[in-house]
Amino acid sequence: MESTVQVAHQQLIAELIPSVGEGEARSIARLVFEDVFDWRSGRRDRILSGEEIEKLQQIITRLKAHEPVQYITGQADFYGLQFEVSPAVLIPRPETEELVEWILDQQAAYPGTVVVMDIGTGSGCIPLTIKHNWPNAQVHGLDVSPGALQVAKVYARKLSLDVQLWEQDLLNEAQLK
């Protein structure tokens, strides 16, 4: 069955409203259509391919199973950057953006080189955002999960940021010696 992007966008919203409410349904639909189908509201309408319709049906199934939209799209916005995410990492939170903003507000007080260590770095959103916005900082991220570190390393390379990322379990005394 043929469908346009605008019709599919409205159908996704309608599918999600019963479980998440209208506001959240619109937000999720915006993320899906921007990140997966490269379409933004106000853009020229187009016909979805059969493959895109199938992909949208898979996305709807996953959303109805309460899978976070960021894991479905593989992306999460954080402090003006778009991070790759997977179930190997936690989805960056707005409260964490506030922490990063507070840290970045300290730049004037520390004009020289500063060292920053993020323990439990996950996606790397904290150290990578700090390094991106405070280039002369020496930034390190530490995590016990190789999968999480792989996600962070991919994005560090993508942004060409010199951030040291370490696999370490601080709760394992044998690793600390």
Image (tube, helix red, strand yellow):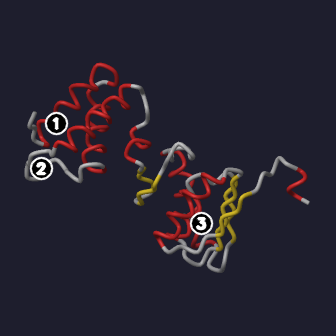
Residue ID at (56%, 59%)? 152
The amino acid type found where label 2 is placed reads: Gly
Drawn side of residue 24 relative to residue 133, left or right: left
Q: Are marks 3 and 2 in contact (CB under 8 Å)?
A: no
- Does residue 154 appear to the left or right of 43 in the view shown? right
Depth check, mark 3 against mark 2: the one in front is 2
* Viewer-proximal residue among 138 and 143: 143
Q: CA distance from mark 1 to mark 3?
A: 46 Å
Camera-side residue of 132 and 65? 65
Quadrant hosting residue 114? bottom right
The numbered mark, 2 or 1, whose residue comes first in the sequence reads 1
Spatial separation of the CA atoms under disc 2 and disc 1: 14 Å
Query: Which quadrant, please, contains the C terminus?
Result: bottom right
Q: Quadrant of residue 24?
A: top left
* Residue highlighted by disc 1: 8
- Left or right relative to 75: residue 60: left
Q: Is residue 89 above or below residue 161?
A: above
Considering only vertical position in the picture, is 45 above or below 59? below
Quickly name the residue at label 2: 42
What residue lies at 21% left-to-right and 26% top-to-bottom? 14
The residue that mark 3 highlights is: 106
Compared across the picture, whether 146 is left or right of 2 comes to right
Residue type, numbered disc 1: Ala
Q: Quadrant of the N terminus?
A: top left
- Residue 147's x, y, as percent? 61, 52
